[in-house]
Image (tube, rainbow, N blue to C red):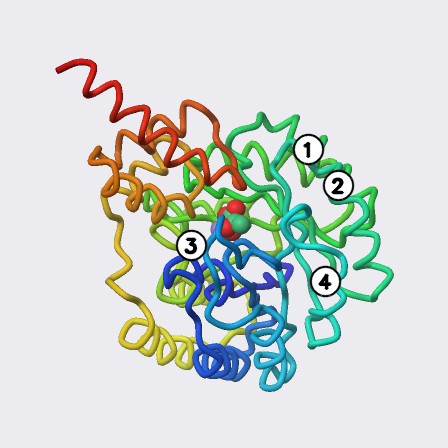
Amino acid sequence: MTKVLLTEVALRDGSHVVAHQFTKEQVRYVTEMLSKANVPFIEVTHGDGLGGSSLQYGFSKVHDIELVEEAAKVAGDSKVSVLLIPGIGTISQLKDAHAAGARMVRVATHVTEADVSKQHIETARNMGMETIGFLMMSHSAPPEKVLEQALLMESYGAHAVYVTDSAGAMLPSDVRDRISLLRKNLKIDIGFHAHNNLSLAVANSLVAIEEGATRIDGSICCLGAGAGNTQTEVLVAVLERMGIETGVDLYPMLDLAEYVRNDILPHPQDITTGSLVMGYAGVYSSFLRHANVAAEKVGVDARDILVELGKLNVVGGQEDMILEVASEIAREKVGKI
Ligand SMILES: C[C@H](O)CC(=O)C(=O)O
Ligand SMILES: [Mn+2]
């Protein structure tokens, strides 16, 4: 059986949970522990990737590049990865991240917009970086469309393409359909990134592996947007029980999970009403915090905002729509009185 390569995303996807306030000390400590546990890839960036620190997405406490630099100092044999969404991050920022020690990049686009990743994937390959395509909101397109877009990323030179369940909305059959079709038609590696909004992240990751995915994302102690991602330490334990090799040591991961639970998470990372509704309605996981803020501001139910965002198929980058949708719901409510 092929080895499964884990990418730990807590220091990037988990940035949403802490409103992008990771400190250098936290990033250094978590990276050092992950490296000791032999996690091969560690992603460190603002939650919305390089250049995400902004009024639209929330300002970081410490600049991306400084965090990458900090992580790279202690990453040892692990590779530091960055996320780059073309249009939010730039090629110049990618070069800065590479100079700071990043050795892998995940170029992320909406699932129907892979064509905007060409230049970024080609540049990353030319810089010698491990280069991954990351198709966000993959639940929202049929398997054939996901395949078409993955083939584009493969043709640009990606080493692997991820099916990304940004909304935590996929059922096991959705994962099976997409990963198996990609496996039959792509030559490169296939990865899977889950969110646990419907409590399916570990199960869906296992289905992905069963269908041929060899790269899986996790976040330690579910430190990721919404209800978090596939809980890395749980996945490590389950895969070990199944005889699937990851090379990652369980006990240091359990120790690190305790640190994350006690010292980083602002609240226990369980499946709240908000995260469940995101999975149910198919809404981008990082919208939860924004929806809660908008609900509070205009006095409407965050669930109504999320369901409406799902109906409108709002995609990452359209965070400004959240307040608009909330205000529209509030106007309708007043109209009904
Ligand atoms: C920018 C997003 O948070 C990327 C991601 O992790 C996802 O789509 O899921
Ligand atoms: Mn994510």
Q: Identify residue for label 2.
A: 186
Q: Identify residue for label 3.
A: 229
Q: Earlier in the sequence, mark 3 or mark 1?
A: 1
The answer to whether residue 284 of the structure is visible from this angle is yes
Mark 1–mark 4 Cα distance, whole angstroms, equals 26 Å
Mark 2–mark 4 Cα distance, whole angstroms, equals 26 Å
In the rendering, at what x and y percent does residue 229 appear? 42, 54
User: Tag on residue 147?
Assistant: 1
Left or right placement of residue 196 versus residue 139 in this view: left
Q: Earlier in the sequence, mark 3 or mark 2?
A: 2
What kind of element bears circle 3? loop
Query: Which amino acid does the dot numbered 2 rest on?
Result: Leu
Q: Earlier in the sequence, mark 2 or mark 4?
A: 4
Instruction: Between label 3 and label 2, give the one nearer the viewer.
Output: 3
Mark 1–mark 2 Cα distance, whole angstroms, equals 8 Å
Residue drawn at x 36%, y 30% is 281
Query: Which amino acid does the dot numbered 4 rest on?
Result: Leu
Query: Which amino acid does the dot numbered 1 rest on?
Result: Leu
Q: Which of 96 and 331 is in front in this view?
A: 331
Q: Which of marks 1 and 4 is nearer the N terminus?
A: 4
What kind of element bears circle 4? helix
Label 3 C-beta lies within 8 Å of the nearest ligand 2 atom:
yes
Q: Quadrant of the C terminus?
A: top left
Mark 3–mark 2 Cα distance, whole angstroms, equals 25 Å
In the rendering, at what x and y percent does residue 158 appear? 77, 51
